[in-house]
Structures are given as structure tokens and as C-alpha cells.
Amino acid sequence: MPFPAHMRQATAHGSAVNAAQRWRPTAPLANLRRRAQIVGAIRAYFAAQGVLEVETPQIGSATVSDPHLNSLYVAGYGYLQTSPEYAMKRLLAAGSGSIYQLARVFRADEHGRRHQPEFTLLEWYRLGYSLERLIEEVASIARLALGDLPSERQRYRDLFQRYLGLDPLRCELGALRSAAAEHLDLAFDDADRDTWLELLMSAVIEPQLGRNVLSFVVDYPPSQAALARLRRDADGELVAARFELYFAGVELANGYHELADADEQRARFAADLQARAALGLPAVALDGDFLAALSAGLPDCSGVALGLDRLIMLAVGAHSLAEVMAFAVPWGELDASA
């Protein structure tokens, strides 16, 4: 589609270039060669493990209900998918066994140094894997690109207590607002609990994570479970069976012990739709085929989505995603601080 006039001269770093040079890749060819090497190593790893590579549609009649994700809609066709998760779980329910995919995905309003509206997710599901075993495998995949790094695990709750002096599972909404006022420059104060938690996590805690170590954060609040099961942590608190991986202050992966209860998933979707309505966001069509697959029976599994472009960006020491993508969307790099 045509780009807005004020964006047509943008390069990967937001500087003006001669329009005649806009045909050139945004990534140096050396980075694209390294990208191909990393992708080859990932495919070889899964082939050796007997994990099946699959492909699922990038356009669907339904999309995610998460109020923090904005889908792109193509009139007459459907939604560009923000993740291959629903379709991959339909394959799992059909008996595929462990699977992986290198999927092009799409998210509206994603722009900046670490964001693009079109990017690549490495997503995979392992039957019979505990969350702890999947964390070990995610570390192995990350090391294919980043080298032989050590890993660590930290609880979400412990991080908030260390860096903000707050218990994220128990503190009042007012305490979160006060912490945000102290640490962030914001022009609003009307937000729900999870929005404040996510803002504080991204702005205050994330930059401290993954300094020369693969840092896995575990045991998120149950309200942030999304498609993960719930479990009890070491203190007996109810938490999400979920983890995220950070390196050099960058979020790389998000993994779950996958929820298999169709009724619980329907209830979570309904809560998402209520949250969207409260935020003034449009309603979205829910994926009935995915819910039917859960009802038919999803095998016990853990799964993870890893941002491949971010992993490669860190592996080559690039400043932005545009430097590891052949042709990045120009407006995605106008805000170099994002």
C-alpha cells in the first residue's frame, strides 16, 4: 500500500535518503547471511529432535481478543494473524505431535526500534513438556544465536519487590499509580491494574534483565495468564504457569503451560471482550474452531513464541529490527527511542 507522504523518505534510522535508493534492503547483506545461518541452525535443531515443521494461514476469519494487541483487518478477506497459536493448537488436537513454525505475523500500531507491524515469530509446542523443561529448550535455541550464555530464573513477584518495593500480587491500585508517577512520565492516570503492572515492568524492570545472562521471568499474576494454566508458586500463591525470556533488556520469548480447558478459555475470552469494551476498543470475532479444538481435547503440552527478528538483532549487535529484515516497514523506525 502507499506510504504517507511524510514517511516516504524514511530509512531504518529515520534519516532522509534519495528516493532513488529506497529500493535497497534495510539490512546489510552480512546480517541477512547471519540470519539465514541462524534459521538453518534452528531448523536443524528441530529436525534432530523430531519436531515437525508446519505452516498455517496468515489470514483468518477470527483474531485474538487480548485488549493489548491490535489486529490488522483486510476487507473482504479477514484478519492478518498476530500469532499462529490458535491454528497450531488445532493441529495439536488433531494429533500432530510436537510442532514448530517460522510464522510471519502482523500487529497494528507496532513501530519503533524493536517493533514492526510485520515480523517473524518462531513458535513451537512440546507434548508432555513441563514449563521447566521448555525453559531449558528455549535457552538452547537462544544459544544457537547468542552463544554459550548462562541462564537464570527469577520470579515476577521478587522482581517487583526488589526494584519497586511492591508486591504485585497484593498491593493496591493506588500504590501502582504512585510508583508509576515516580518512575514514568505519563499523561494519564486512569488504567486498570494490569496496565500499570505492564508499564512498570517494561519501563523499570525489563532494562535490568538479561545482562550477559539469559534471564527467565516466571510466575506471572493470574490476571496475565492469557492462554496459560494457573498453578501455585513456592509461597502457595496462585500464579500463571508462564515465563518470559529477556536478554540485554529485550523481551525475546513468552511461554505457557498451555490451557486445555475449553470452558475456562471461553470465560477468559469473554473477560477480554468486556475489557475491550471498557477501553473503547472494537469487538473482535472469536475463533470458534480453536475453541472446538480445545473441546475435542488438547494434549498436555507447553508452548512458546520467540521473536526471531529480535533474537537476530541481538546476535549481530544491530540497533534496530530494520537492520536484520530485508525490507522493514519504513514508519517502523521513525521513533528510534521506542
Image (spheres, rainbow, N blue to C red):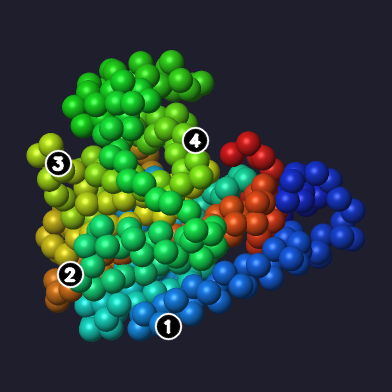
Calculate the distance from the C-alpha at mark 1 to the C-alpha at mark 4: 35 Å
Which residue lies under the disc numbered 4? 207
Which SS class for mark 1?
A: helix
In percent of width and height, residue 334 lies at 69, 43
Q: Residue at 60% of width from left, 57% of height from top? A: 315
In the visual, does 335 lie left or right of 279? right
User: Which amino acid, mark 2?
Assistant: Asp
Which SS class for mark 3?
A: loop
For residue 20, what is the image quadrant?
bottom right
In the visual, does 26 lie left or right of 235? right
Point out the tag, 4 or 3, that comes first from the N-terminus: 4
Q: Residue furthest left?
A: 236
In percent of width and height, residue 120 lies at 52, 64
Query: Given contact means CB atoms under 8 Å apart, are the residues at marks 4 and 3 in contact?
Result: no
User: Which amino acid, mark 4?
Assistant: Pro
Is residue 73 among what the camera can see?
no
Point out the tag, 1 or 4, that comes first from the N-terminus: 1
**Please, is residue 212 above or below residue 38 in the view?**
above
Which residue lies under the disc numbered 2? 300
User: Which amino acid, mark 3?
Assistant: Ala
Which residue lies under the disc numbered 1? 47
